[in-house]
Amino acid sequence: MKMLAADYAARLPGLDTHSLMHGLDGVQLTFMPMGDRDGAYDPEHRVILVNSRVRPERQRFTLAHEISHALLLGDDDLLSDLHDAYEGDRLEQVIETLCNVGAAALLIPRTLIDEMLSRFGPTGRALGELSRRADISASTALYTLAEHTAEPVLYAVCAVARLPVDEGDDEGERPAKALTVRVSSAAPGVKYSLRPGTPIPDDHPVAAALDTRLPITQDSYVPFRSGRRMPAQVDAFPDRHRVMASFLLPVRAEAAPV
């Protein structure tokens, strides 16, 4: 799927909306309200539908996702292999996953990933710049950058979110909102993880970057939900209402999920 999408992207005149459709002869693109659905591809009528009421970056990823559906349906060998290996709901799940993979390959050229890592290293800034330059969501940039990072790094997008209140807790005694991990991913081979919803302590560099609106790089720690603090070099890059963060782990850190 990556090869299909990358080959398609290589033949396009650009990666704007009009150019993304350039390689699909006879396929129409229509923006319209679609309720909870982001988009759809109708191969019978050769039309791609995109929800007109979602964020532009989401529309862009949805378009690439639906183009990936068209590419997959046009590859008889890949389609045959999928039907041989899967069926029913599992087949649909695998196809959706593959189309997400294709969308990322379409929108994020490998040359751009290499450029960001070469210029900024495996850092929060590289994550923020990749999201901006490719015009994609932070989560899509995060998963893609993590996949191509050789160093033992955890990436995270952190933002202020409302905290859930457990039954029996006094809501008045706890903050209604706090800086937490929104999404996280690790480089290949790193077995640690930062769960969504993990709170960021007030004295952590990620919190300081959000408060000061200044990028911060310093030796600190990974704030695991369990309370364990693993030493790491933290790079925190503020981006509007959120912080793009990277945690470079010690090379000899014991690999065990937390």
Image (tube, rainbow, N blue to C red):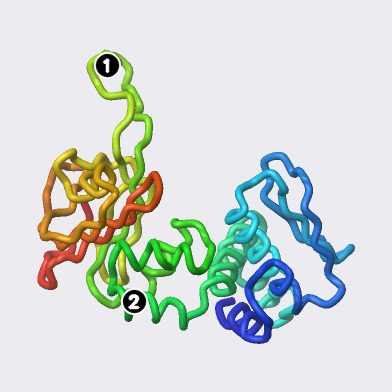
Image quadrant where residue 175 sits: top left
Left or right of 31? Residue 111 is left
> What secondary structure is marked by label 1?
loop
What is the three-letter code of the residue carrying label 2? Leu
Residue at the spot of label 2: 117
Q: Position of residue 47 (x, y in %)?
A: 83, 62
Q: Vertical placement of 114 versus 62: above or below?
A: below
The residue that appears at 44% across and 57% down in the rendered structure is: 138
Q: Nearer the viewer, residue 2 or 218?
A: 218
Hey, which quadrant is residue 68 in on the image?
Answer: bottom right
The residue depicted at 25 percent of the width and 21 percent of the height is 174
Residue 200 higher or lower than 47, as above or below: above
- For the residue labelled by badge 2, is the local secondary structure a helix, a strand or a loop? helix
Q: Residue at x 26, y 61 (%)?
A: 246
Query: Label 1 sits on what residue type?
Result: Asp
Query: Is the C-beta separation of discs 2 and 1 under 8 Å?
Result: no
Quarter residue 145 falls in: bottom left
- Neighbor class of circle 2 (other Cα within 10 Å; few <14, some 14-19, many 20+) is some
> What residue is pinned by disc 1?
169
Q: Is residue 132 left or right of residue 86?
A: left
Left or right for 200, reference 81: left
Could you tell me residue 30's position as x and y percent?
81, 57
Of the pair 41 and 210, the residue shown nearer to us:
210
Which callout, 2 or 1, points to the residue nearer the camera?
A: 2
Q: Position of residue 113 (x, y in %)?
A: 42, 76
